[in-house]
Amino acid sequence: MTTLTEYAETHFPNHVTEPTQGDLTLTDHTAVAHVVGAANGKAMARRVQQALPQAGVGAVMVRPTEPTVVAEGGEDPEGVVDLPIRRVALSGVVGAVLAGVVIGVLVGISRDSLWVGLVVGVFAAILGAVVAFMLSGGSRFGGERAWEQPNVPDRTVAVVAAFAATEREAIAAARVMDELDPYEVRIVTSDGAWHSPNT
C-alpha cells in the first residue's frame, strides 16, 4: 500500500512534500488531481469534500526547491530540453529565404517566366526551411527523448486525492475535480498505479 505522500514523491522527485491532513493511504479507487498553486489545491479539496462528504479527502503540497546543480558541458545532442529553439527557428527562416530566392530566380530565368519562378521558389523555400530546421537540431523533436516535463519551478503544486470506496465514487470525485481545471486527473489503485484515465 502506498501513501499519498509517497505517490507525490514518486511524481515529483527531489521536491519538498508537505501533507495537509496527515499521510493518508491510497485506496483501490483513489481519484488524484495535480493542481498548480496551493490556494487552488485547497479550494479543490474543499469542493470535493462538499460534493462527496462520504469520501475522505487529502492533499500534499509539493514545494519548489532551489537548484543545486549547475549544468556543465555542451548541449545534449539527443534531447530537446536544452535545444535553443531560437536557433532552430532562425535556421528555418534563413534556409527558406536562401533556397526560395536562389532556386526561384534560377528557374524563373531559365523558363523566362516570373510566375513559374515564383511558384517553384515557394516550394523550394518550404523544402529549404524543413531541411535547415532539421540540420540545426529540429530533428531531435522526432526522437524518443523529444519531450519536456511540464513544470512550474517557482510555484507549489498540490496533489489532491479523494479516497473513494467504490469505482463509481472515484469517477464522481474525478468529475468534480475536473470541473476546476487541474493539470491532471486520474484514478489510481492502492499502489499508485494508474487505474482509469477515462473520467
Image (cartoon, rainbow, N blue to C red):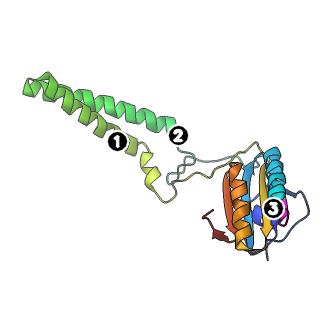
In the image as oriented, which residue stretches furthest toward the right?
22
Query: Is 71 within the magenta?
Result: no
Front residue of this view, candidates 70 and 111: 111
At 34% from the left and 42% from the top, the residue drawn is 130
Circle 3 residue: 52
At 82% from the left and 47% from the top, the residue drawn is 38
Give the Cα separation between the discs numbered 3 and 1: 53 Å
What kind of element bears circle 3? loop
Counting from the top left corner in percent of width and height, residue 7 is at 76, 66
Q: Is residue 175 above or below residue 155?
A: below
Tell me the tag on residue 168. Answer: none
Query: Is 55 within the magenta?
Result: yes
Circle 1 residue: 130
Left or right position of 178 against 137:
right
Give the Cα separation between the discs numbered 1 and 2: 17 Å
What kind of element bears circle 1? helix
Circle 2 residue: 84
Q: Residues within 10 Å of mark 3 (few under 14, many from 20)?
A: some
Front residue of this view, candidates 11 and 183: 183
Magenta segment boundaries in residue numbering: 52-58
Where the N terminus falls, by quadrant?
bottom right
Q: Is residue 92 above or below residue 56?
A: above
